[in-house]
Structure formats: structure tokens, C-alpha cells
Amino acid sequence: MFKTLLAIAAAISTLSAQAEISTYQSLPKDYVGTINPNSFIEDEVTAGGFNELMKYVVAAPSQEDAGSCLYMSHTGVVEWWYNRLNNLEGDNKVDFAERYYMSLKTNKTNQDEIDNWRTDNIRRINKSSVMFSNKDYRFTKGNFKKVDGKRVVTDANDEDGSYGTQFNWIDLTDTIGKNAVEYKLPKFKREVLHVDADKDQWSVAKAPADIVERIKKALHKRNAPVLVIYNHKGFWHANYIFGYNDNADTKGCPFVSSFKPFMEEKRDYWLEKAEKTKSDSWRAKYLANAEKVMEKGDAVQKRYEEVGCASKGVFYVRDSIYPNENMPKYDYDLVKEGEEDFLNAPLIAREYAWVQTTLNHAIQIYPEGME
């Protein structure tokens, strides 16, 4: 089932096995379902659920291999708040620039206020409390290469260059047009619902027993989303939750039930590498990788067996790694053809066991004064 993804993994270095998720091309559809992508109408996923927050959600472009999930999620929550505070719905919603938030990270904006990047990144936007729309600073694709570990602009003829969404990490905010609208934002704060004791974004099976109820309570407390970080089958990943439905069928908990089998395939890949190499040092690294992936796989499976797969109950998730063929095509590069991809569905449903087994951080972002 995961052979294609493993083929991609074969080209990744040993350290990349613990990177932010980037093998987007062949991610299995390991979710319960997606909402009707053209309108937030009630269907088998949402009928009878807590649906109050979805009208301010904006679908994200696929991040592809940008490694930008934390900033896609933060941008999504900030635009959600802007749309809510200004009562913008439907075609009137503002689509903020993920690329602008990524530039804040590149420039280490407000870095002295970031004690734990897993929970504190909202403080970057507080430096100026300004945002731009995606129309004026587009999440794009471009030609880039790395020089001394830093991405720089290059051209299509550069043999050392690449083309893709990692281009968005290069700060080109000085190219934003003079007529671009500056959206004024409130100062934001965050409430930490859960933080891993070791500040480990790959941690599994350590979420508190009441994490599902904590998230639900937070959703109701401020009628606002919850941003989470979790282990996505060996990679860390971030997205945000904006609702839930206790009545929706979990369809066998597709994410959690496929976690250990996926890790077993990754283990077999590393064991095969260890068997073929003639280098003792590389063999030791490959064997260590095989052991690490199964530590995570076994831990998730053990917690899964403890909490079980409830027949009903899903969270509504906005994500950036599942382009949906029923959504409109997103044009990354306005001067190039053939690089387009579908937008993500605005709602992906995941079983509650997902956060019970793999979540390691959860925060709720909100404007000052809404404590």
C-alpha cells in the first residue's frame, strides 16, 4: 500500500526520516473523509456536528515539499480570525500569504520572544501586526539553490538549482507592490493546551488521556480553532482543528490503524539498506533508523490498543498536504504552465484516536482581550 512513498523515501538521507513532512506526492488517503469541497453543507461527516467555525476557513494550497506546515497552519489561523472579526464569509473571505509568514521565520522576526518554536510562533506576527494577501505575495514555485545552507534565487539553467515550493523561504518581501493592501491585525496570544515535556515534535503516545475533551472545550471556549503538532508516521506535521462531530462514522480509524504497518515498511527499508551496505558506520546508522521507526510504531500501536477505535467521533482538520481533485486548481507560477495542483479540501475528517496516539503539542491562538 505504501510502496510508492517508500520509493521516494529511498532518495532521502537518514536524517530526513525525522524532518517536517515533505513526501507529499504519494501520501495515502488515510483520513475518514472530506466535506463537499464546494460548499460547507451538512453531509455524512458534518451532520449533527459542531460546525460553527467552518464558515471562516480558507482552503490552503498544497505545500508540496516546502516543509512549511507550521507556517501554513499559523497563516490559516490568523486569516480565520481576520475573517471572523470582520464577518467575512464566502467569496468575501481574505486569503492571507503563507509566504509572508515564512519570510518572518527566514528573517528570525521577534526571535527573542520565541522560547519554544512549537508553541510561540504566533509572536512573530506581533512584531508588526501586519499581513498581506496571497494575491499580493503569492505562495509560488521558483528556481532556487542552496549556498552555504541558505536558499537563494537562481534560474532554470543552473545545474545546481531546483524548482519548487521551497522557493517561498527566500525573503522577497521587498517586491510586494506599493499598492498592496496592508491588513492590520490585532495582537495575538496563545493558550497552551498541551506541550510535550521534552519539547519533542516527534513524540507519540504521550498526549494526556483527556486531550480530546481539552480540544473540544477550547473550540467552544473562544469559538476558535486549535493548532496541533503531531507525528505523521515518522515525520512531524502541523495543522489546525476547527470543529468535531461525535456522530460521524470513523470508518475503522484509517490514520491510526495504518500507522504501525507503515512504520514496519520503513523498518524493512532500513534493514535492507543495512544488509546491502559494505560500510560498518552506515550499517549502524541504518539499523538505528530501523529501531527508531519501530519504537514509534510500537508505541502508537500500544496506545491505540489502550484507547481503541471508537465507532464514531471525528475532528474537522484544515491541512496543507492533501490536494483534492474536486477542488479548483491552484496556479503557483503565473508565468509557467504545468506546475499547478489542486487546492486542499477545506475539511479533512480524522478520528479522535489520531490525537490520542500521535499529538504532542496543542495551542489555541486568540486576539488580546479574549482571554
Image (cartoon, helix red, strand yellow):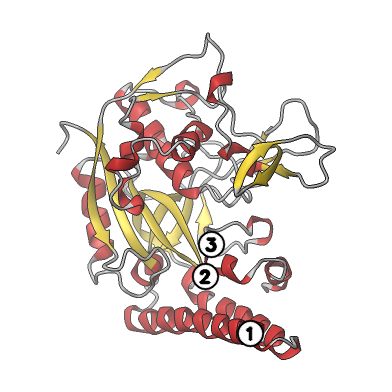
Say what amino acid the circle numbered 1 marks.
Answer: Ser
Q: Which mark is residue 234?
A: 2
What SS does tag 1 mark? helix
Can residue 52 be seen at all in this image of the molecule?
Answer: no
The CA distance from mark 3 to mark 1 is 22 Å
Residue at horizontal 56%, vertical 80%?
289
Q: Are marks 1 and 2 in contact (CB under 8 Å)?
A: no
Residue marked by disc 3: 19
- Decide: marks 3, 1 in contact (CB < 8 A)? no
Query: Which amino acid lies under the numbered mark 2 shown in the image of this protein?
Result: Gly
- Earlier sequence position, callout 2 versus callout 3: 3
**Residue situated in front as seen by the camera: 83 or 267:** 267
The amino acid sitting under disc 3 is Ala
Label whose residue precedes the other's in the sequence (3 or 1)? 3
Give me the residue at 52% from left, 57% from top.
Answer: 33
Which of label 1 and label 2 is nearer to you?
A: 1
Per the model, the C-alpha gap separating discs 1 and 2 is 23 Å
Q: Which mark is residue 281?
A: 1
Residue sitting nearer the eye, 70 or 144: 144
Which type of secondary structure does the marked residue at label 3 adopt? loop
Please determine whether, in this image, residue 33 is positioned above or below residue 53: below
